[in-house]
Each structure stands twice: as C-alpha cells, then as structure tokens.
Amino acid sequence: MACKLQQVGFLGFDVFGTVVDWRAGVARAAAPFLERYDIELDPCAFANAWRALYQPSMETVRTGQRPWTRLDILQRENLERLLGAHGVAVDDIPEQDLAELTRAWEKLDPWPDAVAGLTRLKRRFAIAPISNGHIAGMLKLARFGGLPWDAILGAEIAHSYKPQPATYLKSLEAAGFEPGQAAMVAAHNGDLRAARALGMRTVFVRRPHEYGPDQSTDLEAEEDWDVVADSLEEVAGVLGCA
C-alpha cells in the first residue's frame, strides 16, 4: 500500500471525528450546562443533536442561501436552535454561558492514537487539517490537544465547505501542492470520495464510535481507498513512518 502514496508529500486531515472525539468532548462540556438549566437531555444525546445540525447549516452556505459564514457562528446559531427546540428560552441564559458552551468545539480530546500517529506521519509528510472548522478554532483545538500541524488549512482558506472542491483545492494551493501530491485522511467515506474526484490519494481511518455505540455510518471503507486502517498509528506504519 505504501507505494501508492510514493509521490505524496502532503496529508490533509479531516479533524472532527477523524482526529478528535467531538462527541465525548461536547458531552463533557454540556453536562454541567444541562444540569444548571434543568434541561432533561442526556449529554451525549445533546452532543449528537447539536452535531446533526452541522451539515444543514453549512448547506445554506454551500448553496448560496447566505454568504460565507464561519463555523463558530454556525455552531452558535445551531446551539440556540437546539435549545429552542427543547423549550429553553435562550434570552434567559447569560451570554457568557452560551459562549462558553459553544467553545466546547475547541476543547476536544484527540483519539488515543492521534497525537502519536500525527507525530510519526509528520516525519515524512507535511500535515495540516483540511477541515470545515475555522482557523481560530482549529488553532485552539490544536493547542488544547497537542496536535502537531505544520499549517492550518480548510474551509476558511477557501470560503467554502467540504465537499465543495474549492475547500480541498485552495487548501492544497496555499500549501504548495498539486492534488496528485496529496492525500486526504478521513473517517468519512464521503470526504474521501470528494477528494479522490479531484485527484487526491485517500486514507480511510475507521472510527466506529464517533457517534456512539449505535453508529451506523462509515463503519467500513465503501471504496478501494489507497490505505484503510484502524488508527493513525497504523497509517504511520503502513506508510513507513518510524
């Protein structure tokens, strides 16, 4: 498998779900908030429900229904929408509490294999997120979890959200790589499908518990991706990174 990436010098990473465990981190932040405001919702269910609003909110930007809007703004709007759906009067909650909960997305633990795997991969490849996250949030997330990126790329570079081609292509252009010199690393088949269509190589990392014990999507590789692995450490081994 390593020979398939022989010409590759850059690895772009999906972050939420592939590198960090968003569900556990958001649930951890949500638990005291839900208790403080007597919201009868399981913290993990709350995290999943908040995440479920992620793609629909980005779709309004992809389709041009609204101009470019950073992910932190969308996440805050989604939080208020979610609370409203559960009968919570958002105007009665102090701004500082809403802002702090929104920042939960900047304080997510890496998966246990992530930092060690990234560190090994960085010895051979340039590495950076190609994420829908905004730059400031990705910077804070990297500092929180010790993620050793060479750069921070993605949606805010391109003013577009994956899987739109510009998100990948403008990120690669900023880093100085052609699609054929780069690989996308993700736990989501759709992300890899979009990257492959542009000429990028593909690395699928299984994260079967991203959405919890009842996850039903992205449990297996749906195409013949160049590398398929169960961890970033395994990816590093396959690609010959000591």
Image (cartoon, helix red, strand yellow):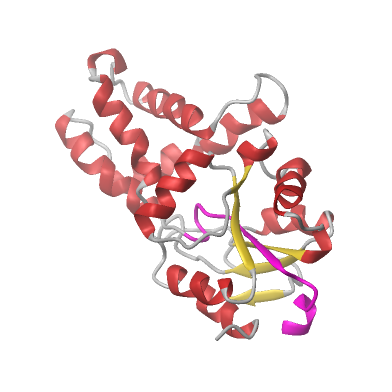
Q: Residues in magenta? A: 1-19
Residue drawn at x 55%, y 30% as measured from the top left: 70
User: In front: 21, or 142?
Assistant: 142
Decide if residue 30 is on the left or right side of residue 234: left
Residue 110 located within the stretch drawn in magenta: no
Toward the top, the furthest residue is 91
Residue 14 located within the stretch drawn in magenta: yes
Residue 109 appears in the figure: no
In which quadrant will I find the C terminus?
A: bottom right
Vertical arrangement, residue 91 with respect to residue 138, above or below: above
Residue drawn at x 71%, y 48% as measured from the top left: 174
Q: Quadrant of residue 113?
A: bottom left
From the top left corner, tell me how far across and down residue 99 is, in percent. 32, 28
From the top left corner, tell me how far across and down residue 64 is, in percent. 72, 22
User: In front: 93, or 159?
Assistant: 159
Vertical arrangement, residue 44 with respect to residue 81, above or below: below
Q: Quadrant of residue 202?
A: bottom right
